[in-house]
Image (tube, grey):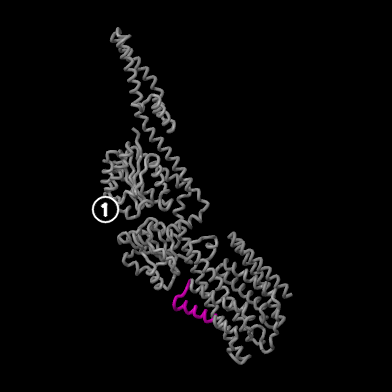
């Protein structure tokens, strides 16, 4: 029976951050989760991908429908552990070609919130390694993941997709330079630990910013990040006190409610004698109240604004996504051919069995009727002769199948054999 | 002779304006170098024309609108050229060149009402007063231009509309600082201009203050700029508020300069009795 890839999951488009957080797989429970996943009856191979923007289960199965049901249940239980249940509405499920395409698009960062951001590939590799360690992936997912890494690499080198995410950072720097004459004497406040926040903070540092403050609800995370950027960690409760020192405020916290409201910002502005402030909101949920932008001397750009500007900056690049999608399509076709060709081994066995069955039947029939006077020695000779005939007949086709020339031809031959000898019908 | 030089001046200002517009359209560096050079050429001719006038009359001819516009545009171009040398604010030239061209064109077209300056007025006070007042106003014209740029840039940043112009305009911080620089230079010049004028009036007319419309409009602008400077230094006024007040102050000056004399007869308009 043919194996198929299925993917069940949710991402930044289908589920709000609270739901994603409830389903997320912490590192500590990951190997247990992978074992549970592998233990599902319909799942022969499985892997988990859990980032701040997506939670997905990738599985190889021989029974798509059961796998969908079981994997969904698996995710529901994961959520139930968090004491809530609203998951069903946010889930998507892909099988076969769609599933392969989905994983390749994820790897190539075409499905990311910020298309082209580079972190997702690293995360995918990490989760693949974890699945390998837990022993939950086999030949099929092994191949699937490795192909997805290749797709990501091809998209990165053959298209301009990657420069789009980087451009969020450079657009931020460019805008900052329209507000501030120089960034060298400016201070950045980085709120939250989101990946985009880090990316933009790094670009701002490269743009000349020398002073950086980092705050996070978890103070330890703030210390870590501050060390990375040679900045100063600030306790989250002290944010209002330090805000007035910041000329640029980068928010990437993903909090359920606004971190800053207009009246607080107005107060801060008064304290800093109305020196301009530039707020950059990179959260998928808004960190800063959009009304802040209507205050004087304050400029607030969220990720959509930045992307719109980036888009305008490289309108010549509009075709890059299509180019990347074409690469994905090519690779999906390649992978599916390979998956089909996995049938080759069972096909050869089935073909041998079929011919052996025919030979056995015909030899027995003859020996029972027209040739029943033959001696034991002669019977043996006929048996050997027919066996050799079958062997000779099969030799050509089988050695050809075992020495694949290209994946497509191989798949075609297997398909032809199955049809011609009716190997599927039993 | 004078007229020929002034025509040449206007021509170079026009050429410079054209190249500045080409720069705005195509953003080629070559235009950014050629345009100020054209302006400089116009400025040299302009200087020669003004020097010729002084040599002829023995005093700067600033008694009617035509002559005033000419001197005024000369000062603005001169100050711009200095600013361009120091700050490389090419885009400011895109404001200055058309202004200079229009002023010199107006200077050529408006007929000379030619109020002959009474003998008693031809004192050195006149030169001091006129020079200071005009310098002050010219500086404020540039402050007006950078404030206008500030408002455009700020509007673009707020509304998140990006165009090539957006990249061309200097940062808000720099525009705001220039606003301050022009204010700090322009305000004392204006103050001294008003003081010398008032002293001169005290000597010639016998009253330091005579509710002359010109004096009133100057006083309004002076108060506006004065409070802006005060606000900037003590209360940290800046940005949009500073830009708006600067524009407002200049509109009062400009409005009076262009309309005032015909609406409110003044002793500054060649009618000196």
| Residue farthest toward the right in the current orientation of the protein | B1
Q: How many marks?
A: 1
Find residue B146 and report its horizontal and vertical position in percent: 54, 70
| Residue at (38% x, 22% y) in the render | A394
**Which secondary structure class fits the magenta region best?**
helix
Residue B161 within the magenta-colored segment of the rendering: no
Asked where in the image residue A355 lies, by quadrant, the reply is top left
| Residue at (53% x, 62% y) in the render | B167
Magenta range: B221-239
| Chain on which label 1 sits | A
- Secondary structure of the residue carrying tag 1 is loop
The quarter in which the N terminus of chain A is drawn is top left
Find residue B141 and report its horizontal and vertical position in percent: 58, 74
| Residue at (48% x, 69% y) in the render | B173
Asked where in the image residue B264 lies, by quadrant, the reply is bottom right
Find residue A178 and report its horizontal and vertical position in percent: 49, 64
Please indicate, yes or no, whether residue A185 appears anywhere in the rendered image. Answer: no
Foreground residue among A13 and B218: A13
Foreground residue among B73 and A292: A292
Q: Is residue A284 left or right of residue B3?
A: left
Which residue is tagged 1? A82
Asked where in the image residue B190 lies, by quadrant, the reply is bottom right
């Amino acid at each position: 029976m043919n194996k198929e890839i299925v993917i069940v999951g949710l991402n930044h488009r289908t589920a709000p951050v609270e739901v994603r957080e409830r389903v997320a797989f912490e590192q500590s429970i990951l190997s247990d989760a992978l074992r549970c996943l592998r233990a599902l009856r319909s799942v022969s191979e499985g892997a988990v991908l859990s980032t701040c923007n997506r939670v997905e289960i990738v599985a190889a199965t021989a029974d798509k429908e059961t796998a969908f049901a079981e994997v969904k249940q698996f995710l529901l239980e994961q959520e139930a552990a968090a004491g809530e249940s609203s998951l069903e509405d946010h889930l998507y499920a892909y099988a076969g070609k769609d599933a392969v395409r989905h994983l390749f698009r994820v790897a190539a960062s075409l499905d990311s919130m910020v298309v082209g951001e580079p972190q997702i590939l690293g995360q995918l590799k990490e989760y693949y390694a974890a699945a390998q360690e837990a022993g939950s992936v086999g030949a099929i997912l092994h191949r699937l993941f490795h192909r997805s890494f290749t797709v990501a690499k091809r998209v990165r080198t053959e298209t301009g997709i990657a420069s789009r995410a980087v451009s969020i950072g450079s657009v931020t720097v460019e805008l900052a330079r329209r507000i501030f004459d120089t960034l060298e004497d400016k201070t950045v406040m980085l709120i939250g630990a989101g990946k985009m926040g880090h990316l933009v903070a790094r670009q701002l540092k490269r743009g000349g910013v020398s002073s950086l403050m980092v705050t996070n609800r978890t103070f330890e995370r703030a210390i870590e990040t501050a060390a990375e950027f040679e900045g100063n960690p600030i306790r989250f409760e002290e944010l209002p006190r330090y805000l007035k020192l910041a000329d640029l405020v980068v928010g990437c916290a993903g909090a359920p409610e606004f971190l800053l409201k207009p009246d607080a910002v107005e107060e801060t502005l008064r304290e800093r004698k109305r020196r301009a402030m530039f707020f950059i909101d990179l959260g998928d949920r808004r960190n800063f109240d959009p009304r802040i932008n209507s205050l004087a001397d304050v400029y607030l750009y969220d990720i959509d604004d930045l992307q719109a500007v980036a888009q305008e900056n490289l309108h010549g690049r509009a075709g890059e996504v299509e180019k990347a999608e074409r690469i994905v399509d090519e690779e999906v076709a390649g992978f599916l051919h390979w998956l089909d060709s996995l049938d080759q081994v069972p096909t050869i066995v089935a073909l041998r069995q079929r011919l052996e069955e025919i030979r056995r039947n015909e030899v027995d029939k003859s020996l029972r009727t027209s040739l029943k006077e033959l001696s034991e020695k002669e019977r043996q000779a006929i048996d050997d002769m027919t066996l050799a005939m079958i062997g000779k007949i099969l030799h050509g086709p089988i050695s050809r199948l075992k020495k694949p020339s290209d994946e497509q031809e191989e798949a075609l031959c297997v398909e032809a054999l199955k049809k011609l000898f009716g190997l599927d019908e039993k | 002779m004078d007229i020929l030089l002034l025509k040449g001046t206007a021509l170079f200002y026009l050429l410079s304006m054209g190249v500045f517009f080409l720069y705005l359209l195509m953003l080629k560096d070559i235009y950014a170098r050629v345009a100020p050079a054209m302006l400089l050429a116009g400025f040299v001719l302009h200087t020669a024309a003004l020097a010729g006038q002084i040599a002829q009359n023995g005093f700067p001819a600033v008694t009617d609108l035509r002559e005033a516009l000419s001197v005024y545009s000369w000062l603005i171009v001169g100050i711009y050229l200095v600013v361009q040398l120091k700050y490389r604010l090419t885009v400011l030239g895109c404001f200055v060149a058309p202004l200079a061209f229009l002023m010199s064109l107006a200077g050529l077209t408006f007929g000379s009402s030619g109020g002959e300056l009474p003998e008693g007025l031809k004192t050195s006070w006149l030169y001091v007063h006129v020079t200071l007042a005009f310098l002050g106003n010219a500086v404020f014209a540039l402050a007006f231009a950078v404030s206008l740029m500030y408002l455009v840039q700020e509007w673009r940043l707020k509304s998140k509309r990006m165009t090539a112009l957006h990249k061309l305009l200097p940062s808000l911080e720099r525009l705001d600082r220039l606003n301050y620089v022009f204010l700090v230079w322009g305000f004392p010049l204006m103050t001294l201009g008003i003081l010398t004028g008032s002293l001169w009036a005290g000597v010639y007319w016998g009253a330091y203050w005579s509710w002359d419309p010109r004096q009133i409009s100057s006083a309004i602008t002076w108060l506006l700029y004065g409070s802006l400077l005060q606000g900037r230094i003590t209360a940290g006024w800046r940005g949009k508020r500073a830009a708006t007040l600067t524009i407002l102050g200049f509109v009062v000056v400009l409005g009076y300069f262009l309309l005032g004399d015909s609406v409110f007869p003044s002793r500054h308009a060649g009618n000196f009795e």
